[in-house]
Amino acid sequence: MTNYGKKLVAKSSTRRGFTLVELLVVIAIIGVLVGLLLPAVQAAREAARRMSCSNNLKQVGLALHNYHDTHGTFPFGSRERAGTFGPSWWAGLLPYVEQNALFDSLDLGLAHGGWSANSGVLTGQPVPAMVCPSFPGETAGGYYGSNWDSKSTYSGIAGAAEFNSPLYTEGRVGLCCDCCTHTGPQNDGLIAAGGVLIANKTIKFRDITDGTSNTLAVGEVGGIMFTANAGAYSTINHHRIEMSAAGHHGWLMGTNGGGITPTRRVFNLTTVRYQPNSTNYDRPGISLNFGVNNPLISTHPGGVMAVAADGHVTFVAETMDLTMLKFKATRDDGQVVEEG
């Protein structure tokens, strides 16, 4: 082979690698593409979770109607049992959300919440239909991280109370004196009885004179709140609180007070006082343990999901006028607020 041929072979076999600058440019381009695509991926995931949440609430709305068809009334929102805690409205809906075996295993004549070992074992695992998939908190172990009742992120709406809403008035409101015996922001909790799911009483379709499509029955209480007092509960971490429908209690917990506006604690029901998606924990009636006014809250951008008494699911914007929201939380105030 001639010298020219050898040089040609040597030249053709040489492989030139990437320079450092070229590698950095490629990495930068990939980073930009990831930065552009990641929000779209996250938005798609949240859209899927929101759709799943909507389906959960559709199931709840259908269950409420099936319960009414069977019993001629909606379930008790919350009940007491011999001066201690009875079951919440979830107990009555179990057969209508494909939880017949769980319902048959419970002795609903016993006290519930963490005070019944049997119910604690049976309800220790989360029921998927009770939890929004966007909820970032723990769903098992509803009481101080124990194995007692698992949590729900859907709360019955007991009505509304007058707070920062001068145009809204409601006489069926009681002060949670049980809350007042404790120090902290939970003082002065107000419990209403103008909604669809209320304590110690059942409501019929005929009682919803504002119209079932105009009255909210169940809404999300499953999001993140913040407090200035870190460490008050084991579930608080660096001022961050994972709020669910019964605080750090479970979906089976009802009330330990009598009457439609109990002076004792009420769980899995909320009386509307604050804007949806309010994150300030340090206000009257808001608490993990005494929170009769925990706000409708979620991690969905812009608002919360809810189901009306006619069974249709709606999105309640966090910017909705508070007085209008309170009208929609009340079944018979004569103030009909249609969806825009």
Image (tube, rainbow, N blue to C red):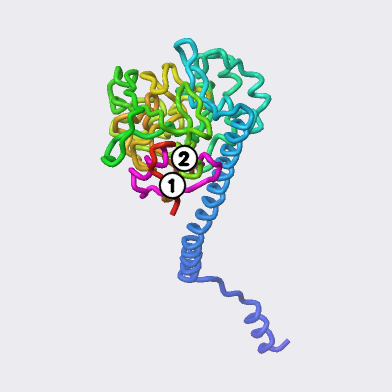
In this rendering, would 167 be left or right of 212? left
* Above-or-below relation of 92 to 41: above
Q: Which quadrant is home to the C terminus?
A: bottom left
Residue at 62 percent across and 76 percent down: it is: 14
Which residue matches tag 2? 216
Single out the mark in the foreground, 1 or 2.
2
> Which comes sooner in the sequence, label 1 or label 2?
2
Residue 57 in which image quadrant: top right
Q: Secondary structure at mark 1?
A: strand
Q: Residues within 10 Å of mark 2 (few under 14, many from 20)?
A: many
Q: Residues within 10 Å of mark 1 (few under 14, many from 20)?
A: many
In this rendering, would 198 be left or right of 117? left
Residue at 50 percent across and 35 percent down: it is: 154
Residue stretch in magenta: 307-330
- Total numbered circles: 2
As drawn, the residue found furthest toward the top would be 82
In this rendering, would 9 be left or right of 243? right
* Above-or-below relation of 306 to 145: below
Give the percent coordinates (x, y) of residue 187.
Answer: 29, 25
Observer-nearest of 17 and 100: 100
In this rendering, would 118 be left or right of 283? right
Q: Amino acid at mark 1?
A: Val
- Tell me whether circle 1 and circle 2 mark residues in contact (CB < 8 Å): yes
Observer-nearest of 162 and 134: 162
Which residue matches tag 1? 316
Q: Which quadrant is home to the N terminus?
A: bottom right
State the separation of the CA atoms marked 1 and 2.
10 Å
Q: Report whether residue 142 is seen.
A: no
